[in-house]
Structure formats: C-alpha cells, structure tokens
C-alpha cells in the first residue's frame, strides 16, 4: 500500500518538474505562443497530471467512491493527451529545418513513441480497472511519459548554466528505466504483480533502441520526411 500512498507526492514532484522545464519556453510567455497546438497539448498534459494527483490523493485517503467518479474524466483527458501528442509531434516535424536529419527523425520517434506508449498503458489500466493492483501500476507507469520532456529541459535551463556535469539527453533516457526497474524490484520483493512495470520497462528499452537506430532506418526516415510534407 505504501506505493499507492506515496504516489501522491511523486506526482506533485513530477508536475513541478514539468512546469519548471516548460516555464521559459511556454508558461512564462503564454501570450506569445500563437499556435493552438501547444495550448491544446499543455492543457491535456496538465489535465492528466491533475488527475493523477487528485486520484492518488483520494486513494491515499481511501475515498474509493469519489475516485471512481472522478476517474470518468480520464475518458476525455486521456484521448486528448494522445491526440495532442501526435499533433505536436507532426507539427514539430513539419517545422524542422531538416526533417531528414538524424536529430529531427529522433525527436519525431520520441514524440510518436510517447503518445503510443501512453495510449497502451492507459488502455491496460482501464481494462484492469477492477483489479486495483494492476490498475494502479499501469496508471503510475503513464507518468514516465511526462518525466523526460520536463526533466531534460529543467536540467538544461537551470543546472547546465552552472557549468557542472549534466547527463546528455540520451543518458537521461535511462532515468525512467531506472525508476521503473526499482519499482519492479520492490514488487518482486513484496510479491506483488510484476507485469505492469515489466511491460513498461520493456517498452522503454524498445524506445531507447528506437532512438539509437530508427533515425538511420530507411522506412522510418522516409515516414518522418513524408509526415513533415503532408501531416504538419
């Protein structure tokens, strides 16, 4: 039960990291952001984090009936997260200076994968909504989708200028895997279901491999270029 009780605090920390990371590029200049794509994505993203915080707080306080009532909002917020994730990814790719470059294709892969992973984890959480242990773990796993975009920006903006060592973006991609591995170890130690965190960790390994190799894989590179020309 400690995993669920402590999730409330971790979700608040995640929200703070996300806001800090996007503060300079988005939150501090809301009036200057012209394209509605970014507003849609921000609203969906913050809406999901708010749901995670509220729902984990309700479970922490054993208010299961209210948890089920508010949980119905996820049927709107979750699709918005997925849709906005795809839209932002295609929009960014269309506005890349060189859509065929390794950097652009990697970012394109990154955005697509996170949107798909979130959709899969949310779907599994809903499928297993009557099994608290599975449902909660799949919901917790959705948080990894939001961690890296905010954390990488926060480190780059607030720690890198101090001229101390900071991990590269690729190195930071292992952070969700480390946290996920730790949670899986705790579940194994406490004889809890391993499948949710095991699945999310394996998916994240695939994500890292995709980042390493898909930028140079012809079919995916061609899809990235085609997307820039037709879906932006």
Image: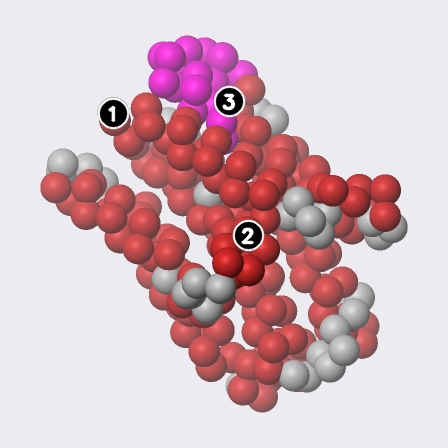
For the record, the magenta segment spans 52-69
Q: Residue at x 68, y 61 (%)?
A: 89
Q: Is residue 216 above or below residue 28?
A: below
The circle drawn on residue 54 is: 3
Q: Residue at x 61, y 77 (%)?
A: 103
Label 3, residues with CA under 10 Å away: few <14, some 14-19, many ≥20? some
Circle nearer the viewer, 2 or 1: 2
Image quadrant in which you'd find residue 57: top left
The circle drawn on residue 158 is: 2
Give residue 85's position: percent from left, percent from top.
65, 53
| Residue marked by disc 1 | 1
Queried whether the magenta region covers residue 99, the answer comes back as no
N-terminal label among 1 and 3 = 1
Determine whether the residue tagged by mark 3 lies in a helix, strand or loop. Answer: helix
Determine whether the residue tagged by mark 1 lies in a helix, strand or loop. Answer: loop
Determine whether the residue tagged by mark 2 lies in a helix, strand or loop. Answer: helix
Image quadrant in which you'd find residue 19: top right
Label 1, residues with CA under 10 Å away: few <14, some 14-19, many ≥20? few
Separation (CA) of disc 3 from disc 2 = 29 Å
């Amino acid at each position: 039960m400690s995993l669920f009780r402590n999730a409330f605090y971790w979700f608040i920390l995640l929200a703070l990291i996300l806001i800090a990371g996007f503060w300079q590029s988005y939150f501090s200049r809301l009036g200057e952001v012209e394209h509605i794509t970014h507003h849609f994505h921000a609203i969906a993203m913050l809406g999901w984090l708010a749901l995670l915080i509220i729902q984990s707080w309700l479970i922490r306080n054993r208010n299961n009936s209210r948890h089920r009532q508010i949980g119905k909002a996820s049927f709107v917020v979750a699709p918005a997260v997925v849709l906005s994730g795809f839209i932002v990814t295609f929009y960014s790719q269309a506005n890349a200076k060189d859509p065929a470059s390794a950097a652009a294709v990697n970012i394109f892969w990154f955005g697509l994968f996170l949107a798909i992973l979130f959709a899969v984890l949310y779907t599994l959480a809903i499928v297993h909504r009557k099994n608290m242990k599975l449902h909660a773990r799949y919901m917790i796993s959705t948080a990894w989708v939001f961690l890296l975009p905010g954390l990488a920006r926060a480190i780059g903006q607030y720690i890198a200028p101090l001229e101390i060592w900071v991990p590269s973006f690729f190195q930071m991609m292992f952070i969700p895997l480390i946290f996920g591995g730790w949670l899986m170890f705790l579940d194994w130690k406490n004889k809890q279901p391993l499948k949710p965190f095991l699945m999310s960790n394996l998916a994240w390994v695939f994500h890292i491999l995709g980042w390493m190799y898909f930028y140079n894989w012809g079919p995916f590179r061609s899809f990235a270029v085609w997307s820039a020309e037709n879906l932006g």
